[in-house]
Image (cartoon, grey):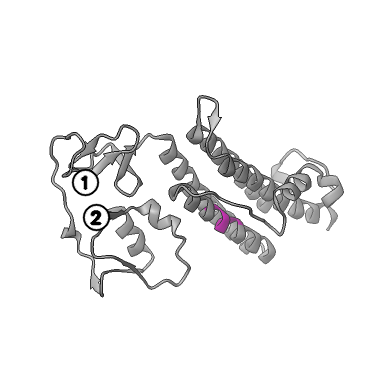
Amino acid sequence: MEILSEYELRAKCLPLGTEEYRVSGDTFVMPGAKEYLRERGIKLVVGEGCECKDEKFNPMPQTAIKSGGDDKYVDYETGKGYSYKPENMTHIRGNLLVSKTHPRIAFRGKLDSLEAKIMETQIVAQEMDRGDVVNDLEEIYGFVRTVLSAEVNEKPLGEFKLLGMDSGRLRYASHHVHEEFGIGHYVPSYTMGKLCVALNALRTAVRETELSAAQAFTKENVTDRVDIIEALNRLSSCVYIVYCRVLSGELHG
Protein backbone atom coordinates (compact mmCIF):
# COMPACT_ATOMS: atom_id res chain seq x y z
CA MET A 1 0.00 0.00 0.00
CA GLU A 2 1.27 3.46 -0.92
CA ILE A 3 0.67 6.45 1.33
CA LEU A 4 0.43 10.02 0.05
CA SER A 5 1.12 12.75 2.60
CA GLU A 6 0.63 16.50 2.25
CA TYR A 7 4.39 17.09 2.02
CA GLU A 8 4.80 14.55 -0.78
CA LEU A 9 1.90 16.18 -2.60
CA ARG A 10 3.45 19.64 -2.19
CA ALA A 11 6.74 18.27 -3.49
CA LYS A 12 5.07 17.28 -6.77
CA CYS A 13 4.66 21.01 -7.55
CA LEU A 14 1.27 20.71 -9.23
CA PRO A 15 0.91 23.47 -11.84
CA LEU A 16 -1.63 26.26 -11.46
CA GLY A 17 -4.95 25.24 -13.02
CA THR A 18 -4.66 21.54 -12.19
CA GLU A 19 -8.23 20.20 -12.03
CA GLU A 20 -7.70 16.65 -10.83
CA TYR A 21 -5.06 14.43 -9.26
CA ARG A 22 -5.03 10.68 -9.86
CA VAL A 23 -3.66 7.96 -7.60
CA SER A 24 -3.66 4.17 -7.83
CA GLY A 25 -6.39 2.16 -6.14
CA ASP A 26 -4.10 0.94 -3.35
CA THR A 27 -3.02 4.44 -2.29
CA PHE A 28 -4.06 5.79 1.09
CA VAL A 29 -4.29 9.58 0.88
CA MET A 30 -3.66 11.22 4.25
CA PRO A 31 -6.25 13.76 5.49
CA GLY A 32 -3.72 16.61 5.16
CA ALA A 33 -3.16 15.74 1.49
CA LYS A 34 -6.92 15.65 0.87
CA GLU A 35 -7.32 19.04 2.50
CA TYR A 36 -4.46 20.42 0.40
CA LEU A 37 -6.25 19.33 -2.78
CA ARG A 38 -9.65 20.51 -1.54
CA GLU A 39 -8.37 24.01 -0.77
CA ARG A 40 -7.10 24.28 -4.34
CA GLY A 41 -10.25 22.95 -5.96
CA ILE A 42 -8.46 19.85 -7.26
CA LYS A 43 -10.52 16.66 -7.57
CA LEU A 44 -8.93 13.53 -6.12
CA VAL A 45 -9.46 10.49 -8.33
CA VAL A 46 -8.51 6.93 -7.42
CA GLY A 47 -8.00 4.22 -10.00
CA GLU A 48 -10.27 4.40 -13.03
CA GLY A 49 -12.27 7.46 -12.05
CA CYS A 50 -13.53 6.40 -8.62
CA GLU A 51 -13.43 9.33 -6.21
CA CYS A 52 -11.42 8.71 -3.06
CA LYS A 53 -13.46 7.96 0.03
CA ASP A 54 -12.38 8.75 3.57
CA GLU A 55 -13.18 5.24 4.76
CA LYS A 56 -10.75 3.66 2.29
CA PHE A 57 -8.18 3.16 5.05
CA ASN A 58 -8.87 3.99 8.69
CA PRO A 59 -6.57 2.16 11.10
CA MET A 60 -7.90 2.09 14.67
CA PRO A 61 -5.60 3.09 17.54
CA GLN A 62 -3.89 0.04 19.00
CA THR A 63 -0.83 -0.70 21.08
CA ALA A 64 2.35 -0.18 19.12
CA ILE A 65 3.89 -3.46 17.97
CA LYS A 66 7.31 -4.49 16.74
CA SER A 67 7.88 -4.44 13.00
CA GLY A 68 6.21 -7.31 11.22
CA GLY A 69 4.02 -8.25 8.30
CA ASP A 70 0.91 -6.51 9.68
CA ASP A 71 2.59 -3.16 10.36
CA LYS A 72 1.26 -0.19 8.41
CA TYR A 73 3.91 2.29 9.57
CA VAL A 74 7.63 2.17 10.34
CA ASP A 75 9.77 4.44 12.47
CA TYR A 76 12.20 6.12 10.04
CA GLU A 77 15.06 6.17 12.53
CA THR A 78 14.65 2.95 14.54
CA GLY A 79 12.79 0.63 12.17
CA LYS A 80 10.13 -0.04 14.82
CA GLY A 81 6.74 -0.99 13.39
CA TYR A 82 3.32 0.42 14.23
CA SER A 83 -0.14 -0.82 13.41
CA TYR A 84 -1.40 2.78 13.64
CA LYS A 85 0.09 6.28 13.36
CA PRO A 86 0.85 7.72 16.81
CA GLU A 87 -0.43 11.29 17.27
CA ASN A 88 3.05 12.60 18.08
CA MET A 89 4.47 11.32 14.79
CA THR A 90 4.11 12.35 11.15
CA HIS A 91 5.15 11.12 7.70
CA ILE A 92 8.62 11.90 6.48
CA ARG A 93 8.11 9.79 3.35
CA GLY A 94 5.54 7.15 2.42
CA ASN A 95 4.70 5.10 5.50
CA LEU A 96 7.91 6.13 7.30
CA LEU A 97 7.26 8.12 10.47
CA VAL A 98 9.26 10.54 12.59
CA SER A 99 8.44 12.68 15.59
CA LYS A 100 6.68 15.93 14.76
CA THR A 101 9.64 17.68 16.40
CA HIS A 102 12.12 16.04 14.01
CA PRO A 103 14.50 18.64 12.47
CA ARG A 104 13.47 17.70 8.91
CA ILE A 105 9.82 18.33 9.73
CA ALA A 106 10.80 21.68 11.25
CA PHE A 107 12.72 22.46 8.05
CA ARG A 108 9.69 21.66 5.91
CA GLY A 109 7.68 24.03 8.07
CA LYS A 110 10.27 26.74 7.40
CA LEU A 111 9.95 26.14 3.65
CA ASP A 112 6.18 26.46 3.97
CA SER A 113 6.54 29.74 5.87
CA LEU A 114 9.04 30.97 3.29
CA GLU A 115 6.58 30.36 0.47
CA ALA A 116 3.99 32.40 2.39
CA LYS A 117 6.49 35.24 2.90
CA ILE A 118 7.31 35.28 -0.83
CA MET A 119 3.64 35.67 -1.70
CA GLU A 120 3.23 38.48 0.83
CA THR A 121 6.15 40.30 -0.77
CA GLN A 122 4.67 39.76 -4.24
CA ILE A 123 1.51 41.52 -3.12
CA VAL A 124 3.57 44.50 -1.93
CA ALA A 125 5.40 44.59 -5.28
CA GLN A 126 2.13 44.34 -7.19
CA GLU A 127 0.60 47.20 -5.20
CA MET A 128 3.61 49.31 -6.18
CA ASP A 129 3.26 48.37 -9.84
CA ARG A 130 6.58 46.50 -9.87
CA GLY A 131 5.76 43.64 -12.20
CA ASP A 132 9.46 42.92 -12.65
CA VAL A 133 9.83 42.18 -8.94
CA VAL A 134 6.64 40.08 -8.94
CA ASN A 135 8.13 37.95 -11.72
CA ASP A 136 11.50 37.62 -9.98
CA LEU A 137 9.73 36.47 -6.82
CA GLU A 138 7.64 33.99 -8.80
CA GLU A 139 10.86 32.40 -10.00
CA ILE A 140 12.14 32.32 -6.43
CA TYR A 141 8.86 30.76 -5.28
CA GLY A 142 9.22 28.01 -7.86
CA PHE A 143 12.77 27.35 -6.72
CA VAL A 144 11.65 26.90 -3.11
CA ARG A 145 9.17 24.29 -4.28
CA THR A 146 12.00 22.57 -6.18
CA VAL A 147 14.04 22.45 -2.96
CA LEU A 148 11.05 20.94 -1.12
CA SER A 149 10.67 18.31 -3.83
CA ALA A 150 14.35 17.36 -3.62
CA GLU A 151 14.15 17.06 0.16
CA VAL A 152 10.93 15.06 0.38
CA ASN A 153 11.91 12.68 -2.43
CA GLU A 154 15.50 12.47 -1.16
CA LYS A 155 16.93 13.29 -4.59
CA PRO A 156 19.86 15.54 -5.53
CA LEU A 157 18.92 19.13 -6.25
CA GLY A 158 21.25 19.40 -9.23
CA GLU A 159 22.58 22.49 -10.98
CA PHE A 160 20.35 25.56 -10.99
CA LYS A 161 20.08 29.15 -12.11
CA LEU A 162 18.17 32.04 -10.58
CA LEU A 163 17.56 35.32 -12.38
CA GLY A 164 19.73 33.90 -15.16
CA MET A 165 22.71 33.47 -12.83
CA ASP A 166 24.42 30.30 -11.69
CA SER A 167 25.66 29.73 -8.13
CA GLY A 168 28.99 31.49 -8.60
CA ARG A 169 27.48 34.50 -10.35
CA LEU A 170 24.82 34.92 -7.65
CA ARG A 171 27.49 34.93 -4.97
CA TYR A 172 29.65 37.45 -6.84
CA ALA A 173 26.81 39.86 -7.55
CA SER A 174 25.61 39.83 -3.93
CA HIS A 175 29.13 40.56 -2.66
CA HIS A 176 29.96 43.30 -5.19
CA VAL A 177 26.86 45.47 -5.16
CA HIS A 178 28.77 48.68 -5.90
CA GLU A 179 30.13 47.27 -9.15
CA GLU A 180 26.82 45.63 -10.03
CA PHE A 181 24.25 48.22 -8.90
CA GLY A 182 26.18 51.38 -8.04
CA ILE A 183 25.27 51.31 -4.35
CA GLY A 184 26.88 50.29 -1.08
CA HIS A 185 25.84 47.68 1.48
CA TYR A 186 23.41 50.02 3.22
CA VAL A 187 22.00 49.23 6.66
CA PRO A 188 18.27 48.56 6.12
CA SER A 189 15.92 51.35 7.19
CA TYR A 190 12.20 52.05 6.98
CA THR A 191 13.10 55.12 4.91
CA MET A 192 14.01 52.81 2.02
CA GLY A 193 10.33 52.23 1.40
CA LYS A 194 7.77 49.49 1.79
CA LEU A 195 9.08 47.18 -0.94
CA CYS A 196 12.70 47.28 0.20
CA VAL A 197 11.63 46.59 3.77
CA ALA A 198 9.54 43.62 2.59
CA LEU A 199 12.42 42.25 0.51
CA ASN A 200 14.80 42.59 3.43
CA ALA A 201 12.33 40.68 5.64
CA LEU A 202 12.16 37.98 2.96
CA ARG A 203 15.95 37.76 2.90
CA THR A 204 16.02 37.14 6.65
CA ALA A 205 13.35 34.43 6.24
CA VAL A 206 15.58 32.68 3.70
CA ARG A 207 18.48 32.86 6.17
CA GLU A 208 16.34 31.30 8.89
CA THR A 209 15.35 28.52 6.49
CA GLU A 210 19.00 27.91 5.65
CA LEU A 211 19.86 27.57 9.35
CA SER A 212 16.96 25.16 9.78
CA ALA A 213 18.34 23.06 6.90
CA ALA A 214 21.77 23.00 8.54
CA GLN A 215 20.20 21.74 11.75
CA ALA A 216 18.17 19.14 9.87
CA PHE A 217 20.98 17.68 7.79
CA THR A 218 24.11 18.01 9.91
CA LYS A 219 25.01 15.11 12.16
CA GLU A 220 28.30 14.79 14.03
CA ASN A 221 29.91 17.44 11.81
CA VAL A 222 28.89 15.58 8.64
CA THR A 223 26.43 17.30 6.29
CA ASP A 224 24.48 14.97 4.03
CA ARG A 225 22.55 17.62 2.04
CA VAL A 226 25.17 20.20 1.19
CA ASP A 227 23.28 20.83 -2.05
CA ILE A 228 20.18 22.09 -0.24
CA ILE A 229 22.13 24.18 2.26
CA GLU A 230 24.20 25.79 -0.49
CA ALA A 231 21.10 26.39 -2.60
CA LEU A 232 19.42 28.27 0.24
CA ASN A 233 22.58 30.30 0.76
CA ARG A 234 22.44 31.32 -2.90
CA LEU A 235 18.73 31.98 -2.60
CA SER A 236 19.52 34.50 0.12
CA SER A 237 21.98 36.12 -2.29
CA CYS A 238 19.27 36.13 -4.96
CA VAL A 239 16.77 37.95 -2.75
CA TYR A 240 19.47 40.43 -1.76
CA ILE A 241 20.15 41.08 -5.45
CA VAL A 242 16.46 41.86 -6.04
CA TYR A 243 16.56 44.14 -3.00
CA CYS A 244 19.63 45.95 -4.32
CA ARG A 245 18.03 46.42 -7.73
CA VAL A 246 14.99 48.05 -6.16
CA LEU A 247 17.08 50.16 -3.78
CA SER A 248 19.35 51.29 -6.60
CA GLY A 249 16.32 52.48 -8.53
CA GLU A 250 15.03 54.35 -5.46
CA LEU A 251 18.39 56.05 -4.86
CA HIS A 252 19.17 56.86 -8.48
CA GLY A 253 15.66 57.41 -9.76
Q: Is residue 27 left or right of residue 233?
A: left
Residue type, numbered disc 2 = Met
Give the magenta part as a residue range: 140-144
- Inspect the magenta stretch and tell me whether residue 141 lies in it: yes
Residue 90 appears at what percent x and percent y?
Answer: 31, 42
Q: Is residue 6 left or right of residue 168?
A: left
> Which residue, as the protein is rendered here, is positioned at the far front?
69
Q: Mark 1 and 2 residues: CB-CB less than 8 Å, in contact? A: yes
| Few, some or many residues within 10 Å of mark 1 (<14, 14–19, 20+) | some
Residue 129 seen in render: no
Disc 2 secondary structure class: loop
Q: Residue at x 25, y 34 (%)?
A: 80
Q: Which mark is residue 31?
A: none
Residue type, numbered disc 1 = Lys
Determine which residue is flagged by label 1.
Answer: 72
Q: Residue at x 59, y 61 (%)?
A: 138
| Few, some or many residues within 10 Å of mark 2 (<14, 14–19, 20+) | few
Q: Which corner quadrant holds the N terminus?
A: bottom left
Determine which residue is flagged by label 2.
Answer: 1
- Inspect the magenta stretch and tell me whether residue 24 lies in it: no
Residue 233 appears at what percent x and percent y?
Answer: 64, 42
